[in-house]
Amino acid sequence: MGLLTNRVERNEIKPGDHIYTYRAVFAYSHHGIFVGGSKVVHFRPERNLDSSIDTSSNLLDPTFPRSTCPTFPDCGFRQPNSGVVLSCLDCFLRNGSLYCFEYGVTPSVFLAKVRGGTCTTAASDPLETVIHRAMYLLQNGFGNYDIFENNCEDFALYCKTGLLILDNLGIGRSGQASSMIGAPLAALLSSPLKLLMPSPIGVATVTAGMYCVTRYATDIGIRTDVIKVAVEDLAMNLGWAGRHDEAAEENEASNRQVVAL
């Protein structure tokens, strides 16, 4: 990996690494945790159980092909009502290139990587802990998918660090989401300065600077409103426990109706 790109070869990644790939001609990236054996645990919008249409926006829907994977029988495994999925590396990449997310980078390196969703100043936990979190969430879910507050990058960041934002309202841990918010915000805030700066270069410089500051300020390694949460306590901390119980009861009721028929 270098300063300009985090692209790696398959033989360079190891279990517990946070990996990602780009979709739609680099329009957005999809993230997951490599758990070894050519398997990746990742988070995506849940599919409507009664149809093939996603229940949430598919703007960032990085789902693998719908057909059965010819290589791994368990590719596509997920629990009911959960968006956490186990897939093989081939289906995760979907012919895209492989990139490895960086942890513990210096502020200068963080700011040098203009695009969000590639690195963080936060340190990674031991790889064994990362894999445990990913596999635990595969069995227990990661709540409802939200493009800005709870997306695939948020999932991978939590698996790597165990950090959650105390106030879960607003923007999540994702650097990609921060970039999506930061760029328009920087342009908006810098617009009054156009009256004072007749030079387009000056305005562009200020806008770029504000964008970088926004990205840096929202990085999970810099924020002070984060807390370490054990994966076993995650559902209770975010209020998922009740919803999971309701979903389980609905599934059980449906099964009873099927048996009765």
Image (spheres, helix red, strand yellow):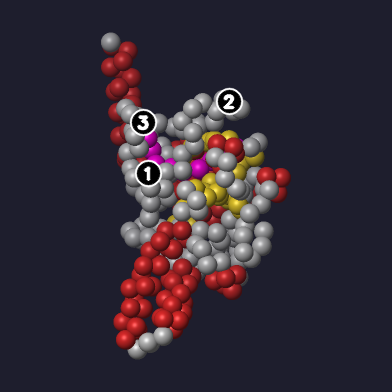
Give the residue furthest to the front. Answer: 199
Give the Cα distance between marks 2 and 1.
25 Å
Count the labels in the image. 3
For the residue labelled by badge 2, is the local secondary structure a helix, a strand or a loop? loop
Q: Nearer the viewer, residue 7 or 247?
A: 7
For the residue labelled by badge 1, is the local secondary structure a helix, a strand or a loop? loop
Residue position marked by numbered label 3 in the rendering: 52
> Label 3 crowding class (10 Å Cα cut-off): few <14, some 14-19, many 20+?
few
Residue ID at (63%, 54%): 7
For the residue labelled by badge 3, is the local secondary structure a helix, a strand or a loop? loop
Q: Nearer the viewer, residue 19 or 189?
A: 189
Question: Which dot marks residue 70?
Answer: 2
> Label 2 crowding class (10 Å Cα cut-off): few <14, some 14-19, many 20+?
few
Residue ID at (55%, 50%): 20
| Magenta residues, start to end | 39-47
As displayed, is residue 35 above or below residue 217? above
Residue position marked by numbered label 1 in the rendering: 58
Using residue 172 as the reference point, say whether residue 23 is left or right of it.
right
Give the Cα distance between marks 3 and 2.
20 Å
Give the Cα distance between marks 1 and 3.
12 Å
Q: Is residue 252 visible?
A: yes
x and y, in percent, of residue 1 in the image: 67, 59
Give the residue furthest to the top. Answer: 261
At label 1, the amino acid type is Asn
At label 2, the amino acid type is Pro
At label 3, the amino acid type is Ser
